[in-house]
Image: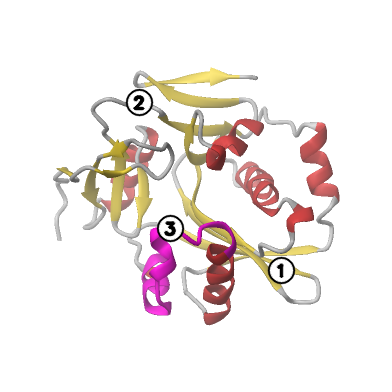
Amino acid sequence: MRDNPQFYMTSPSPCPYLPEREERKVFTHLVGSNAKLLNNALTQSGFRRSQTIAYKPACEQCRSCVSVRVLVDTFAPSRNLRRVLDRNPDILVEARPPIATEEQYNLFHRYLMERHHDGGMMSMTLFDFGTMIEETHIDTRVIEYRHQTGKLLGVCLTDILADGLSMVYSFYEPVETRRSFGSYMVLDHIKRARRLGLSYLYLGYWVEGSAKMAYKSRFMPQERLLNGEWTLITE
């Protein structure tokens, strides 16, 4: 097991956010006895986790991917976000160990079919899904969101960091559009981080011009990592 990280660069590939652009990533492995400390430090400097890999965009001609974290203590939901909370009083939330289930996978597959049918994750099998959920060397939880009748409506793979929570990957029932479930899970994570005494909720990358990432600008105040510095954004 390696304790000293080694960094690598990917080959260019099509950008998943902006058309007619290519992306490259710098990445390292989150393994060994220092995996948890390394993940904390890398997340604070703009990296994201996928299984045992920490990665960060390293595109030569583009800096559109901007790391975003919500300031938990000063966040106050807008009127629209309060409506999201009002539409979900019948949801039960439970934090579970990172163990994949067939029920989660079936929801994951329905979500991809509706929202990301042309994406690379569509080919993931139940085994692949289990690896995504369970392959972690850090403090990770699976947050399940169920209707009070017991039906699973949403799932978020969440890392617990020294200074915040990081929403690694989330998916939800695509037919429940009225609930705005993606936003609801963010709101719940803000509340969860506050309850744990943590300062931030890390949302990954905001990409100006990408409709997929536009929702992240709804959660203010937030900090964005600009030119290597976390910069306060209030509107």
Identify the element where label 1 is drawn. strand
* Residue at x-position 74% and y-position 56%: 177
Please give the residue where the numbered disc 3 appears in the rendered image: 119
Q: Is residue 180 visible?
A: yes
Please give the residue where the numbered disc 2 appears in the rendered image: 63
Classify mark 2: residues with Cα within 10 Å, few (<14), some (14-19) or many (20+). Answer: few
Q: Is-magenta flag for residue 56?
A: no
- Rendering quarter of residue 148: bottom right
* Residue 117 falls left or right of residue 42: right
Label 2 and label 1: CA atoms lie apart by 38 Å
Q: Earlier in the sequence, mark 2 or mark 3?
A: 2
* Residue at x-position 63% and y-position 25%: 221
Most extreme residue toward the bottom is 102
Do residues under tags 1 and 3 come within 8 Å of each other at their CB atoms?
no
Identify the element where label 2 is drawn. loop
Please give the residue where the numbered disc 1 appears in the rendered image: 146
**Relative to residue 209, is residue 158 depicted above or below?**
below
| Amino acid type of the residue tagged 2 in the rendering | Arg
Classify mark 1: residues with Cα within 10 Å, few (<14), some (14-19) or many (20+). Answer: some
| Amino acid type of the residue tagged 1 in the rendering | Arg
Q: Earlier in the sequence, mark 2 or mark 1?
A: 2
Which secondary structure dominates the residues rendered in magenta? helix
